Amino acid sequence: MSADSPPPAAHAARHPSERGILLTLAAVQFTHILDYMIMMPLGAGLMREFNLSPLQFSHLVAAYGGAAAGAGLLGGFFLDRIDRKYALQWLYFGFALATLGCALAPSHQALLAARLAAGVCGGLAGSIVVAMVADVVPPERRGRGMSFVMSAFPLATVAGVPLGLALVNHFGWHAPFFLLAGLAIPIGFGIARFLPHRAPEQAAPLISPIAQMRGILGEGVHWRGFAVTAGVVTASGCLIPFMAPSLVANVGISDAHLPWVYFCGGVATFIATPIMGRLTDRHDKLKVLAWISLPAIAATLLVTHLGPAPLPVVLAITTLLFIGMSGRFGPANTLVVNAVKPRFRGGFMSLNSAVQQGASALANMLGGALITRDLSGHLIGYGRVGWIATGAFLLTLVLAHRLRAAAPHAATNAPFPVAPS
């Protein structure tokens, strides 16, 4: 049996089916992603509500990622030494409480504090979700498994964000966070009921946390994986938070029409995601990443330079952008996780989550620093952000090529190579 094989059949038989596990993990990912995403279409409303500048709003968005990055760095020391199920249960409980805190926040400062707490718990929970997918799903189906869990992104876009915006229109900006806190209750029971235990000795030898971290950071291929992750999120991190405010201020889309942007983008992405998962399993992961990046670049340059336009034109461009942005995560994540030794997977994914959230937070603040408002209320500088995002797209492909060169098996369905004993 290869080092990358799932648990033996006798052990797996005591656990729920692979599909049941993936459904539960996707539900966790759905709420974690929606909690992050809901801040972006709330941008115009929150800036009015609290009289925030674009830079101050970018701090609210970046708070989640920054806190998740710090927590991920600490998680790298111990996540391979803890049963993943127990860790996820406690982190998800903390995430639910923090989200409730967002709903009850009476001020900009209180909301910022609650976003920090949500980032700590949600970021670590997300890294455990990805590690558990790699634990449960064998390499030949891992692309589809990863894409299934990552379909939480389009589902959050097509169902969660429009529903959240509808609640905002009727009950105020607090309502989506109350919804998320309520959804966390049945999902928490699902974690307890359906997810398998993975004892520390299954995942890695019981070595000291410092030695474990030294082992993770001592692998050159891991650094290349971190670089790919940073490149993937930088493009979306500087671009997406200001898409909704730009559509309102620069393009002339009304707040009432914003849900259509997310609904159309989410439906298209929900359809496209499993197709991209199958392509990821059948073809070289780097080639799939390149195929998806090309239309994403075109949509990025269009949306960031768009002036007043009819709603159908806006929907066509933003839908293409959603497909390209979310579609890259499947092949990129699969390429990265395939390159990691199984015994380092939990700690690596925690550090990888830190890199992801940290890069996203920096990109959020970069976008906020480049964008200003003129006297008429238009956003200035979004076009420059589009060119920076385009550069990040292209740099990601270069970094992914370097990762594949260092770990050729990562781009295929081969199990992790094991040295002969």
Image (spheres, rainbow, N blue to C red):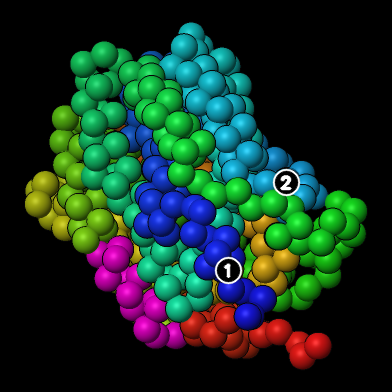
Q: In which quarter of the image is residue 418?
A: bottom right
The percent position of residue 87, horizontal first and vertical second, equals 64, 40
Q: In this view, does 326 lie to the left or right of 391?
A: left
Q: Is residue 111 left or right of residue 168?
A: right
The percent position of residue 184, horizontal first and vertical second, equals 43, 29
Q: At x 25% / y 56%, what residue is drawn?
A: 270
Vertical relation: 234 (above or below) 122: below
Q: At x 70% / y 40%, what residue is drawn?
A: 71
Which residue bears the numbered disc 1? 8
Q: In this view, does 24 lie to the left or right of 274?
A: right
Q: In which quarter of the image is residue 11?
A: bottom right
The count of marks equals 2
Our reading of the magenta stretch's main secondary structure is helix
The percent position of residue 130, horizontal first and vertical second, equals 54, 56
Label 1 element class: loop
Q: At x 13% / y 55%, what residue is drawn?
A: 313
Quarter of the image with the C terminus is bottom right
Disc 2 residue type (three-letter): Ile
Residue 404 appears in the rendering: no
Which residue bears the numbered disc 2? 82
Magenta region = 272-284
Q: Which of 302 and 100 is in front in this view?
A: 100
Label 2 element class: loop
Residue 141 appears in the rendering: yes
Q: Quadrant of residue 403?
A: bottom right
Q: At x 55% / y 23%, what residue is drawn?
A: 98
Q: Residues within 10 Å of mark 2 (few under 14, many from 20)?
A: some
State the residue lying farthest toward the bottom: 420
Q: Which of 318 and 414 is in front in this view?
A: 414
